[in-house]
Image (cartoon, rainbow, N blue to C red):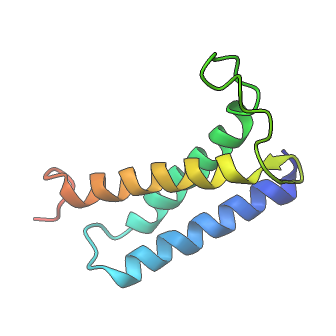
């Protein structure tokens, strides 16, 4: 994955984090940053690992969709969204993270 693709992931993740922060009532002051980091990691991890996986379940998938600067878009979007949503619900429902 090239720098342009990674920079695109980071920019989109930060925009999504800000959107969540502005749309919903804030649970934490820097919740947008936590969500952006999780989304970035999920997108990078999925794009880099799933297309080269040797798992028998994933062996039948030969076409992972379009690429942009070495990043597979479909696994990156799915991985980023899943991890960002899990992080969002984790920060919203965790009792230890709620302000007093």
Q: Residue furthest bottom?
A: 22
The residue closer to the viewer here, 65 or 79, is 65
The residue at 46%/55% (across/down) is 84
Examine the rendered structure and indicate whether residue 20 appears above or below residue 33: below
Point 16% across, 65% down: residue: 99
Side of 18 relative to 25 (left or right)? right
Instruction: Give the percent coordinates (x, y) of residue 41.
Output: 59, 45
- Quadrant for the C terminus in the image: bottom left
Q: Quadrant of the N terminus?
A: top right
Extreme residue toward the left, this view:
100
Relative to 65, 57 lies left or right: left
Most extreme residue toward the front is 60
Percent position (x, y) of residue 8? 75, 64
Image height check: is 47 above or below 31? above
Q: Position of residue 34 (x, y in %)?
A: 44, 57
Report which quarter residue 57 is drawn in.
top right
Name the spot of residue 42 as percent of width and height, x first: 57, 45
- Nearer the observer, 31 or 85: 85
Look at 13% across and 53% down and name the residue there: 95
């Amino acid at each position: 994955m090239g720098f342009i693709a990674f920079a695109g992931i980071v920019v989109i993740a930060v925009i999504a984090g800000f959107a969540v922060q502005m749309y919903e009532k804030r649970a934490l002051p820097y919740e947008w940053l936590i969500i952006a980091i999780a989304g970035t990691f999920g997108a990078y991890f999925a794009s880099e690992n799933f297309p080269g996986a040797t798992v028998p379940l994933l062996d039948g998938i030969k076409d992972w969709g379009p690429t942009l600067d070495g990043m597979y878009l479909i696994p990156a979007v799915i991985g980023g969204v899943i991890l960002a949503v899990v992080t969002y619900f984790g920060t919203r429902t965790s009792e230890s993270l709620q302000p007093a």
